[in-house]
Amino acid sequence: MYIIDIIPITHLPKKTNQWLTYFHPEMIKKGALIQSNLNHRDIYGIVMDCQPVSNMKIEVKSASFVLKKISQIVLEDFLDEKRIKLAYEISQYYFEDLSLVFKSMLPKNIKSLINHLKKNPIKPLVLPKTNISYKSKYVATRFHDFLSSDIWTEINATLTKQKQILVISPNISTLVYIQKILNKKIDKNQISIFSPELPIKKFNENYQAIASGDRQIVLGLRSSVFAPFNNLGLIIVLDESNYSYKSWDQRPYYSAQTVAQNLAYLHQAQIIYQSDTPTTKQCNSWQNILKIKATTEIIDLKNAVLDKSHPVFNISLTEKINETIKKDGRVILFFNRKGSASSIICQDCGKILKCPQCEVPLVLHKDRLKAICHHCFFKMNPPEICANCQSHRIKYLGSGIEKADEELKNIINDKTARIFRLDGESVLNSLKQIEMIEEFNQTKKAILLGTEIIFKPQLQKTDLTVALHPDPLLTLPDYQSEERLLSYCWQLKNLSKKSFVIQTRLMQNDVFQAIKNNQEISFLEKESIWRKKHLWPPYCQIIKLTIKNKIDRQAEKEANLLSLNLIKNISANINLKENALILGPAPAFISKQKNLYHWNIIIKIKKPDELEGTIYERFITNRNQLLKLIPEGWKIDVDPISIL
């Protein structure tokens, strides 16, 4: 008789024991998938330990409960030691329940996968001996140069050693682009897509092929880090600073870059981080990258002559666009604001129309004839009279991409010119977005007006690129605001063959001056020094704690109590006293969302220089002792996208 410890593949409350104990007459391998009964329902579980009863007689006799027998062994060889260890590392780093991590690692339709693996068992692998060892490398190269000498050399070496390669993409557009490139170089039968969005049958076939080693190259989005590798030699993380790698809306709130690093370490594989734009973290790697040839011009909207009938486009900019179109050129216009007007206001009483659930201004969308909240998607018809004072003098303030589209049609002299509008509301499907961009690439006298989703590897260089009104990005009280703006401007500048234009009221801002004078790297170096001095990433780890409550005062009260408790414990902890800092509590930037008030606390903890080994493990242990003080109901977000 054997005592079996399992982790259920289900979500258990955080305060409950994540390990469940059963018995079985025979020994079961660690990593086996079993079925058992929990609270009168059948669940799947992963075997974590199996001990003879004779080794645990005292514990069994003194137990206050009766052990149940597991229902059945479903698959004996389901998870190997490396995947179990990966789940544990994710659980520790993100302070998350191990049961929930296992649930996230496996497909939602697990019954279908089980049936497929029973009919098509995973072949045992005979692994060749190789001398590959864990090594991290950062490659500063653009998507169009994906198979640069550095990356292609590593791919070839890994394929020669019969090792598997994982290429992680931040979005569908990049995945499609990279797959197209690799198909020209490598046998298609050696390439597999790993994505839960695939049809169930195809997903199951790919899962089995990857686990059996029949596919050498695996492409996928962030969830591809959970693919069943047994022979991994190389990981390539494309556009490594992309925010799409973070699971911000669903637990566990993991980042694919961090999980990929753990995966590489466990397999002793090499990992390459590719970046299309310089960042504070890796700005030194861009020192020798060739300067972009396009010139940068800044239009100062403070002193420029304005055309009141077309507030989005300065007169000087209008002339440049028309001149480019006249020469059969193409233009890219970046405008990262949705809608037609950013706010709706009564001119008599000053009342701004706000979302009743989020208390943020509603945005007018003329093409839908709706006022919409971009946080909870509440919709209403634009008012004809003010609900506060009954005035008919309703005014629409600010501009969005719909307004820019409307004006653009009026300012273009050549009516044969084509205007392509690309934002998350005009074209929803990712593949349709790629089709639009490829059509724009092939069209003369064309203008592409879009939000940040235009930044896809399929987009080719044009004659003129423009940042229409990027200033609002600088108004966000986030330590990353300037770096994000620099990234947008860098990409736009890089997309122009000749000229890049910025329309701004803040022309003396350091970001704009750095872009104009080709001093982007110097700017990032100064930013890095500032972050080190004031303890911001990458020199510290940030953990954002968020509480939500229908009553604002109650949320504030809970936030204050927790903040005081955290400060008290940090002061008493010798390992954290000099290395941790609490900011807040404070209302979230959007303080009310979906009828709930949000309050944030920010924890900043200085990182150790070493990201593996004993020192790093001690750092995680001390940090998690602090996080154990956080009550139920709080959202714990390690390495958040934003502190707002």
Image (spheres, grey):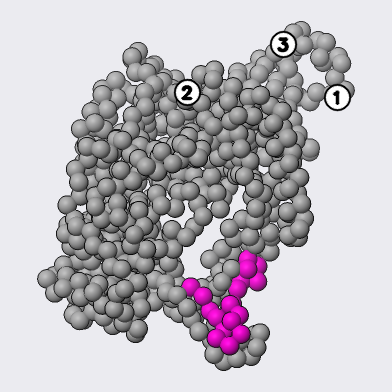
Q: Name the residue: 68% across, 26% down.
A: 573
Q: Which residue is mark 3?
A: 52
354 in the magenta segment:
yes
Quarter holding the N terminus is top right
Q: Position of residue 485 (x, y in %)?
A: 38, 54
Marks 2 and 1, the one that precedes in the sequence = 1
Q: Which residue is mark 1?
A: 65
The quadrant in which residue 42 appears is top right
**CA neighbours of label 1 inside 10 A, class few (<14), some (14 to 19), many (20+):** few
Q: Name the residue: 37% across, 18% down.
A: 133
Q: Name the residue: 88% across, 23% down.
A: 64
Q: Indicate the amino acid at tag 3.
A: Pro
Tag in front: 2 or 1: 2
In this view, which residue lies farthest toward the left? Answer: 327
Q: CA distance from mark 2 to mark 1?
A: 44 Å
Q: Position of residue 116 (x, y in %)?
A: 50, 36
Q: Which residue is mark 2?
A: 610
554 in the magenta segment:
no
Tell me if residue 323 comes above or below residue 346 in the rendering: above
Marks 1 and 3, the one that precedes in the sequence = 3
Q: How many numbered circles does the render carry?
A: 3
Q: Indicate the amino acid at tag 1.
A: Phe
Left-right relation of 270 to 538: left
The quadrant in which residue 416 appears is bottom left
